[in-house]
Amino acid sequence: MAEEKKTATAPVELKRTVVGVVISSAMTKTITVRAERMIKHPQFGKYLRRYTKFKAHDESGQAKTGDRVEIVATRPISKTKHWSLLRVIEKGEAALAAAAPAAK
């Protein structure tokens, strides 16, 4: 019988990604992203919206306020910046309008 050699492959590194809407791009090379999640109320069962804000590194400055973006966890870049921009999913104010509840 011929022996087969097994080559060791490097494990694929899975990093945490988050999709959210850019709420601020005023800082140099930094964007603030608001990610929304739904939680179920333990007693009443109603689903509630909860938000988390992340500061992400945007080297090229391509993301603007209102864009829907995907960010990925990275090494700490500064005191509060631990995320980096992966890609812009959707451009413009349409993303901001879809994420914000109607003010009526």
Image (cartoon, rainbow, N blue to C red):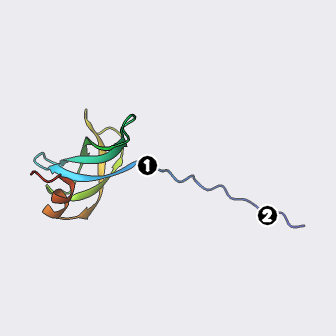
User: Label 1 sits on what residue type?
Assistant: Lys
Q: Which residue is mark 1?
A: 15
Q: Quadrant of residue 53?
A: top left
Q: Which label lies toward us, 2 or 1?
A: 1
Vertical side of 83 occupied by 21: above or below = below
Vertical side of 4 occupied by 20: above or below = above
Q: Please state if 44 lies on the left or on the right of 63 as rendered.
A: right
Callout 2: helix, strand or loop?
A: loop
> Which labelled disc corresponds to residue 45?
none
Q: Residue furthest front?
A: 44
**Could you say where residue 6 lies in the image, as x and y percent from the top left?**
72, 59
Residue at (10, 47) in percent of width and height: 26
Q: Which residue is mark 2?
A: 4
Q: Quadrant of residue 60?
A: bottom left
Q: Is residue 86 visible?
A: yes
Q: Nearer the viewer, residue 46 or 71?
A: 46
**Could you say where residue 67 lies in the image, as x and y percent from the top left?**
19, 59
User: Label 2 sits on what residue type?
Assistant: Glu
**Could you say where residue 2 lies in the image, as x and y percent from the top left?**
86, 67
Q: Residue furthest bottom?
A: 2
Q: Is residue 62 visible?
A: no
Q: Nearer the viewer, residue 8 or 92?
A: 92
Residue at (25, 32) in percent of width and height: 79
Residue at (21, 54) in percent of width and height: 99
Looking at marks 2 and 1 on the same chain, the residue that comes earlier in the sequence is marked by: 2
**Could you say where residue 83 lies in the image, as x and y percent from the top left?**
31, 45
Q: Which class describes the residues within 10 Å of circle 2: few (<14), some (14-19), or many (20+)?
A: few
Callout 1: helix, strand or loop?
A: loop
Q: Which class describes the residues within 10 Å of circle 1: few (<14), some (14-19), or many (20+)?
A: few
Residue at (36, 42) in percent of width and height: 39
Vertical side of 64 occupied by 81: above or below = above
The alpha-carbon separation of the residues under discs 2 and 1 comes to 33 Å
